[in-house]
Amino acid sequence: MSPGADHGTDLFSFAAITDEPLPEVAAAGHDRCIIPIKNECLDAWLSPDPNNLAAMYAILDDRPRPYYEHRLAA
């Protein structure tokens, strides 16, 4: 932090967890795809039990599997 910065301000940040792309995402030329986390899993994800790594992997495995479409822009 810079000198004189307010140490009470919030830091808004994020991280994107990625995995191998779905076939239709790879066909569009991407080599990674974001892993979406279900809304009902957000609290568990944001406040993990440090002794239960398996629960974190279960959240990543139990994800929505959308289908993505793409088309070439003119």
Image (cartoon, rainbow, N blue to C red):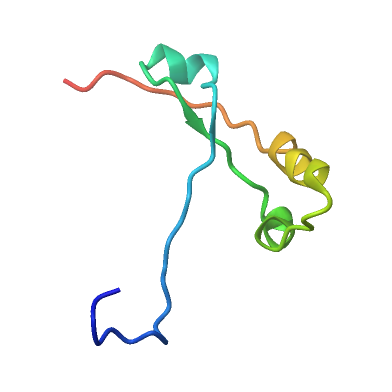
Quadrant in the rendering for residue 40: bottom right
x, y percentage for residue 41?
A: 72, 54
Quarter of the image with the N terminus is bottom left
Quadrant in the rendering for residue 43: bottom right
Relative height, residue 23 to residue 52 (above, below): above
x, y percentage for residue 53?
A: 78, 45
Residue at 16% x, 20% y: name it: 74
Q: On the picture, is 48 further left or further right than 4?
A: right
Q: 47 or 72, which lies in front?
A: 47
x, y percentage for residue 19?
A: 56, 28
Relative height, residue 12 to residue 4 (above, below): above
Q: 24 or 4, which lies in front?
A: 4
Q: On the picture, is 17 further left or further right than 65?
A: left
x, y percentage for residue 22?
A: 54, 20
Residue at 23% x, 82% y: name it: 3
Q: On the picture, is 28 further left or further right than 17?
A: left
